[in-house]
Amino acid sequence: MPKRVITANRLVDGAVVWRDGAGRWREEIDHAAASDDDETVARMLAGARTDEAAGVVIGPYEVEVEQAAVSRKLLPTHLRERIRAGGPTVVPN
Amino acid sequence: MYAYDTLDQTFVEQRTAQFREQVRRRLANELSEDEFKPLRLRNGLYLQLHAYMLRVAIPYGLLSADQLRALARIARRYDRGYGHFTTRQNIQFNWIRLEDAPDILNDLAAAEMHAVQTSGNCIRNITTDQFAGVAADEIDDPRPWAEIIRQWSTNHPEFSFLPRKFKVAVTGSASDRSAMRVHDIGVRLTRGIDGEIGFEIWVGGGLGRTPMIAQLLRGFLPKEHLLGYLEAILRVYNVEGRRDNLYKSRIKILVSALGIEKFRELVEAEWNQITDPGLQLGDAEISRVRAHFRPPQYADLPGRSPEFEAKRLEDAAFARWAKANLFPHERPGYAAVTISLKPIGGVPGDLTAAQMEAVASLADAYSFSEIRVTHRQNLVLAHVPQHRLYDLWRALDALDLATPNLSRVTDIIACPGLDYCGLATARSIPIAQRLSERLAALDEQYDLDQLTINISGCVNSCSHHHVGHIGILGLEKGGAESYQITLGGSSAEDVAVGRIVGPGFGAVDVVDAVETILITYLGQREDGERFLDTVRRVGQDPFRDALYKQP
């Protein structure tokens, strides 16, 4: 199975956040806990849903990632998630 | 322009207070997201990819200078210093924090604005011609009628849970600058056989995944019956419109399924049952609303300004801008100025807080403190004395707001697309920027004349891609962005839905493809022929051949 991380939007400001290994929500995907093990991912998602029920984040879900060959940074495989992770690809006027 | 009365002000203040309490409860986790979402959407607050987005209503696109300053303060204080004008003549802020939303609504209310009904299955912001009250070909000023419809539709208890969102446009001219026939209801002012003012009522237009052109429902509706007749249409839609399938829930699907004759029969039957005298528009009520839209105190000016003519001869850049961005004013010695929000290579429809404040000051100095937002994501100063145009142009040029490209190939409509929008399937803005950079030189060299490009980042078609002369729809195909091109669309009086020219292009190739289309046009056009006319004359084959046939 491909590696996956858990993401959501933070309730208070809607910011994109990623769940780290300690269950904290971080703004940079580099801090996200990644796993290719189904049970581990299910456990991470269950923890995220507990945070959702507590009103910390909105709509957690898993995102497939790959590791960059040189930098070893996590990179979502899907464009939408890459834009969520990196911000808009355009700069304002 | 319209000024709130006590009823309006009380309503927006009460709604703001109500929403403040709802936000408090959400942040305290007393409301779940499922419970809160419909409440925030009722106040124009979406959750997008990176943050909350607040869509602020600008009724029929009309703003005072002070209101634009209020929007600038919101952009600076609560957002990242800019806003994005939309095809519903509204403005969106892309980087809003939930906890700030009540304060923003409070600031809006203080400036007689709100975000009510900018989302949800209700009657959305009423749009109209940006040259309302100014165009010489106008039968009547559409703004009072748009305001009457706004008052009727705001918080209308019967139409708060329609099958789907509902959009109304009003136009006062035969020339349609409001995309009237791609709206759920299009209202066009007309005259009866004795010269009295009334309305043509068009129904069942819309874009999205099933584009349709509105059909004529009633050729002449006496003005006093406007609200009663609209009420009858909405009642029929509310009862008969589909609620079982999101994609078939707009009124266009109902009208198409029933046929216009049957739909008309239902509406007329419903209308005949309506006896509410409150829906009958009396002269006093019409006059009350009309009084808010009296013409400003124009000076008596000669029809031609020697200063304007001289500057046009002296300064080629000014002459080019004047040719592209001015619209004739019905008043001698004045012109309506379109401020392009499409700098070459820029983000279509974006304006920084500093630019908003500067435009507000220019509106104070040159155009009776009034600004209009166009459905093509530009701004208008509607009443500028011709002898002051050169000074205004210089001021706009210093702000990077004097791009001479109104309705030209670089005046591109683009939705936020996948860079911001949670619904998008592909990016719009970067494509628009690259097209703008590539095509500006082509336009300068060959004079591509009137040519619109509209780019949407998903099938919801917020950028009206179906009715762009060239339409571009961004989709996701096999994990990559794919851009489908349509040719021959129009949202004007020669309204048409564009036809797909062939298989889509990737994000890298789509700019080359559009350039190929334009070079093909240059090879095919006859003297004075717009792109749209060439496409209609020669059909799609020459373009298809150029795009897809191997050399």
Image (spheres, rainbow, N blue to C red):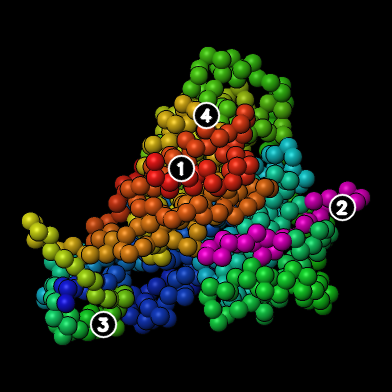
Whether residues under marks 3 and 2 lie with C-beta atoms below 8 angstroms apart, the answer is no
Give me the C-alpha separation between circle 2 and circle 4: 41 Å
Q: Are marks 3 and 2 on the same chain?
A: no
**What range is drawn magenta here?**
B190-215
Give me the C-alpha separation between circle 3 and circle 4: 58 Å
Foreground label between 3 and 4: 4
Indicate the secondary structure of the residue bearing disc 3: helix
- Residue B204 colored magenta? yes
Provide the residue designation for mark 2. Answer: B192
Whether residues under marks 2 and 4 lie with C-beta atoms below 8 angstroms apart, the answer is no
Provide the residue designation for mark 4. Answer: B447
> With B235 as the anchor, is B393 left or right in this view?
left
In primary-sequence order, the first of circles 4 and 1 is 4
Give me the C-alpha separation between circle 3 and circle 1: 53 Å
Question: In the figure, residue B268 lies in which quadrant?
Answer: bottom right
Foreground label between 4 and 1: 1
- Dot 2 crowding, Cα within 10 Å, few <14, some 14–19, many 20+: few
Provide the residue designation for mark 1. Answer: B546
Foreground label between 2 and 4: 4
> With B215 as the anchor, is B25 left or right in this view?
left
Q: Chain of mark 4?
A: B
Whether residues under marks 1 and 2 lie with C-beta atoms below 8 angstroms apart, the answer is no
Determine whether B250 is above or below A44 in the image. Answer: above
Indicate the secondary structure of the residue bearing disc 1: helix
Foreground label between 3 and 1: 1
Residue A3 numbered mark, or none = none
Judge whether residue B200 can be spotted in this image: yes
